[in-house]
Amino acid sequence: MTTPTSQPTRKRIVHQLDTPFSTVSWPAVSPEDQDTILELLCDNTDTSSLLSPLGQYRQTHVKRSKGKRAARKEKDDKKAAGTTEELPVPPVPEIDASIDVGLNSITRNLQALSQSDAEAAQDKPERQYLMIFVARGNQASTFNCHFPQMVAAASKSLPSSDKIRLVGFSNPCSDRLSACLGVPRVSSIAIAKDAPGAGALQEFVLKSVPPAEAAWLDASRDAQHLTTKINAIETTVGPKRPKMNEITS
């Protein structure tokens, strides 16, 4: 049996279909400003913290479901002890009506915000966002790479002072956001304009975070044809496998 000789590395060109429009980058926010924004959102020791009241409310007044059997047993125990009356639950903090949590709900609302007037009449957005925060450090880019494009599209017809600000936290912070809100997992948070109690956060974000810009949105109005963009990528190919008759000969 002959031993196959080593073959030189082979190369080939692979073609990849790409968009003719320019990509949209995340707005540049310094690490120091990211830390300040996170503190304004979550610091439990600070009276200006925005999300902490929601987490405290959920921990105190919202019971996690333990199943029907556990709920029935708790009800029977209260009836046997003669304490069927429950204390009135205070209202949810006012900020709850001005925020959305989670990729799906935020993406749906951004889609509604970016529609034309005729389309928006059929699918009216729930609220007008001013700030969106994404825990990029805890996710693969596949889950959040659409945010810069969608934020730019949703802001294109807004005045400069009302354009949505997008903040991508580069360091992992999902656990802290989850603990602050009292929910199992948080990947993104959107806050509406003039949300109650958000004055300090809104002022700092508007000062330190630039709006998301998409040059292709302006270029699309020119009605100019853009040719298809095809990338030619050089890659390596494994050694050619010898045929059976070459191995046995």
Image (cartoon, rainbow, N blue to C red):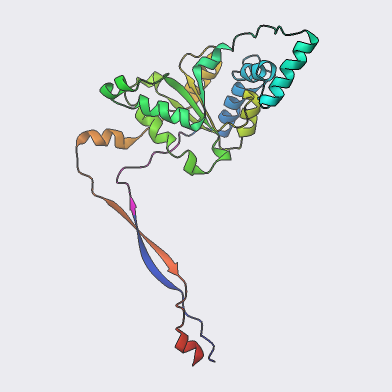
Which quadrant holds residue 61? top right
Q: In the picture provided, is 110 more to the left or to the right than 115?
A: right
For the view shown, which residue lies furthest in the right direction? 81
In percent of width and height, residue 55 lies at 64, 20
In percent of width and height, residue 43 lies at 66, 22
Q: Does the stretch in magenta take in 189?
A: no
Q: Is residue 66 above or below residue 193?
A: below
Q: Is residue 197 visible?
A: no
Q: Is residue 26 above or below residue 52?
A: below
Which of these two is toward me, 150 or 127? 127
The stretch of residues the image draws in magenta is 17-27
Which of these two is toward me, 150 or 248? 248
Which of these two is toward me, 212 or 195? 195
Q: Does the stretch in magenta take in 26?
A: yes
Q: In the picture provided, is 34 more to the left or to the right than 123?
A: right
Q: In the picture provided, is 4 more to the left or to the right than 67?
A: left
